[in-house]
Image (spheres, rainbow, N blue to C red):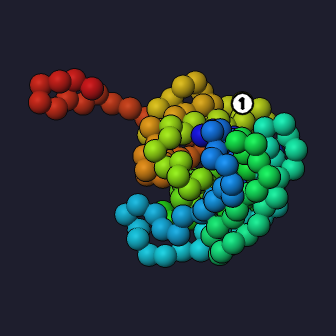
Amino acid sequence: VKYWLDLSDIQHHELNISIQFEAVPEGPFTLRMPISSPGRYAEHNFAKNVYDVRAYDGANNSAQVVKTGPSEWQVTGHDGKVDFRYTLFGNRADGSYTGIDNRKVHMNMPATFIYGLGMEHRRIELEIDLTDHPDWKVATQLEKIDDRTFRAPNYYYFYDSPTIVGDIDFRSWPSSSNGQDY
């Protein structure tokens, strides 16, 4: 499962997100936005910030998207590949929600990313388009592939990996534990 983040509309508090799913079983494909976050188990309506939803098959033909619940969509007319796209509005940077502006992007992953039902154990890759912000950096616990691509072994790890993108000032210092230096 691969996610792409387009930061071209951050001045409007928007992220344009594309998700590419492969080997999708035949029939309706269900996608959901989480309603809670790790460590903060109160229910939230994260999907209220999702709009301009559309889907395409592997040949880039439109697939039908129907909203089947407050935090759920179904895609039909796919060919085993689904490219699901949406816009996310975020103007509340805290531990539960996502904040997006022209200085930084503060992502609580469950408040940002829709997932494919039945795909929870697949490896996740996140690519962030930093073309318009070449000096920005990414702070996350996700495995770094390169300066703009990150990976998680599954959705559970992905959703428990808050991520910040922006002009970040990193500081580090040596540490040791049990006789091992870090």
Kindly identify the residue that appears in the image at 65 percent across and 75 percent down: 70
Residue 69 drawn at (x, y percent): 66, 74
Mark 1 residue element: loop
Q: Against 21, is 55 above or below?
A: below
Going 69% across and 58% down the picture, which residue do you hit?
A: 28
Residue 168 percent across, percent down from the top left: 56, 40
Seen in the image, is 118 located left or right of residue 182?
Answer: right
Residue 42 position in % (x across, y down) = 44, 75
Q: Quadrant of residue 114?
A: bottom right
Tell me which residue sits at (58%, 24%) in the image.
Answer: 146
Quadrant including the N terminus: top right
Question: Which image quarter holds the C terminus?
Answer: top left
Q: Which residue is mark 1?
A: 134
Front one among 55 and 162:
55
Above or below, 167 relative to 84:
above
Inspect the image, locate mark 1, and give the three-letter code of the amino acid beneath it.
Pro
Residue lying at 77% horizontally and 67% vertically, measured from the top left: 66
Q: Position of residue 133 (x, y in %)?
A: 73, 36
Can residue 156 be seen here?
yes
Residue farthest to the front? 26
